[in-house]
Each structure stands twice: as structure tokens, then as C-alpha cells.
């Protein structure tokens, strides 16, 4: 199950999310499921911030017309050129992934790649501003690195959800 939602939040909320992630100096270079092989930017413990754990979470439930039994974790990942993720499965039943970057071009890469049972690329979800993706946490996936021509931070906001 992979569901894609474009133009997920109103523009005002999209920019509030990006501002909260950019302007708070809580990013650290510890991200990744396999920290020996991959290192990228991580902004942890967003579930402790009411804006993300209550306001944004309630908007997600409203927009998806769905209630979840709970949130396991909320965090943001950041990748710069060359910081590719490692294929993995997520904790939690479902993952809600949101792309807050206000501008993006297909040449910047940084796409979400899902793998089949043979670790072959099964589906690619292009990174697109204000796009959300909801998927089964048990689906193996990874985030491709942004292009070497991209000089910023490719961000994704992740909600690990219980059905």
C-alpha cells in the first residue's frame, strides 16, 4: 500500500513547517538506520513538540479522513548531495512522509525508492514540494541522495504510526 497526496497542506502550513525545521538548530549528523554505512542529517523528538504532535498530526488525520491508534515517533531527515539512504523497513505500522521543501526540480533527484522481495527497484516516488506519502512500514525502501548540483538540504518529515 503506497498512497501519494500532492498539495497536502495549505501553503501557509507548508511554510510554517519548513520554517520550524530550518530555523531551529537541532539538526545533527546522526541519521540513518545503519549508522555505520550511512550518515545524514536528523532532527529527532518532534513528538515532544505540540506543533507537530498535536496540530500537524490532527491535520494529517483530518486530511486522510482517518484515525490512527497512536504515533510512535515524529522526526525529520535531511540529506545533502551524496547522502544516500540504505534500504530498510520502518518501525510502526504505517509511515506518513511529508516533503516540505518549497522548491524542487526532478534533476535534483532525492526520490523515495521502494524495493520488491528481490531488492529490485519496484516503485519510485519523486520528491515534490508539499507531497505526502503514506505507506506500510514493512515495505523496504530508501531515500536516494540529492544531486551533486543541489546545494541545500532535502528534508522529509516522518510520522511512524500505529494502525
Image (cartoon, rainbow, N blue to C red):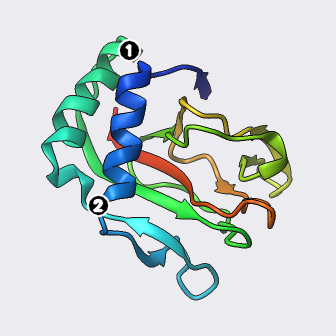
Q: Position of residue 101 (x, y in %)?
A: 55, 43
Badge 2: residue crowd in 10 Å (few <14, some 14–19, many ≥20): few
Rendered residue at 66%/35% (across/down): 128
Q: Is mark 2 on a helix, strand or loop?
A: loop
Q: Left or right: where does residue 154 sit relative to residue 13?
A: right
Rendered residue at 65%/53% (across/down): 140
- Quadrant in which residue 54 is drawn: top left
Q: Where is residue 16 in the image (x, y as percent from the top left)?
A: 33, 36
Q: Position of residue 65 (x, y in %)?
A: 35, 11
Q: Position of residue 91 (x, y in %)?
A: 42, 55
Q: Is mark 1 on a helix, strand or loop?
A: helix
The furthest residue to the top:
65
- Quadrant in which residue 56 is drawn: top left
Label 2: which residue? 24
Residue 88 versus residue 117 in the image, above or below: below
Question: Upstream in the sequence, badge 1 or badge 2?
Answer: 2
Q: Which of 135 and 5 is in front in this view?
A: 5
Residue 138 versus residue 32 in the image, above or below: above
Tag of residue 134: none
Tag of residue 63: 1
Rendered residue at 30%/69% (across/down): 26
Question: Distance between the Cα atoms at labels 1 and 2?
Answer: 26 Å
Badge 1: residue crowd in 10 Å (few <14, some 14–19, many ≥20): few
Q: Which of 38 and 43 is in front in this view?
A: 43
Q: Which of 48 and 147 is in front in this view?
A: 147
Residue 31 versus residue 131 in the image, above or below: below
Is residue 159 visible in the rendered image? The answer is no
Viewer-nearest of labels 1 and 2? 2
- Quadrant in which residue 13 is drawn: top left
Amino acid at each position: 500500500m503506497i498512497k501519494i497526496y500532492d498539495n497536502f497542506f495549505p501553503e501557509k502550513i507548508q511554510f510554517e513547517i519548513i520554517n520550524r525545521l530550518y530555523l531551529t538548530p537541532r539538526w545533527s549528523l546522526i541519521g540513518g538506520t545503519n549508522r555505520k554505512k550511512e550518515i545524514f542529517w536528523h532532527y529527532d523528538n518532534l513528538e515532544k513538540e505540540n506543533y507537530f504532535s498535536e496540530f500537524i498530526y490532527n491535520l494529517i488525520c483530518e486530511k486522510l479522513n482517518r484515525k490512527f491508534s497512536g504515533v510512535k515517533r515524529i522526526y525529520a531527515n535531511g540529506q545533502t548531495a551524496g547522502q544516500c539512504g540504505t534500504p530498510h523497513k520502518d518501525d510502526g505500522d504505517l509511515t506518513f512522509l511529508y516533503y516540505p521543501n518549497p522548491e524542487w526540480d526532478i534533476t535534483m533527484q532525492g526520490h523515495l525508492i521502494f524495493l520488491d522481495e528481490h531488492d529490485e527497484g519496484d516503485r519510485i516516488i519523486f520528491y515534490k514540494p508539499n507531497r505526502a506519502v503514506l505507506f506500510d512500514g514493512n515495505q523496504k525502501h530508501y531515500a536516494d541522495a540529492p544531486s551533486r548540483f543541489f546545494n541545500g538540504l532535502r528534508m522529509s518529515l516522518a510520522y511512524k504510526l500505529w494502525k
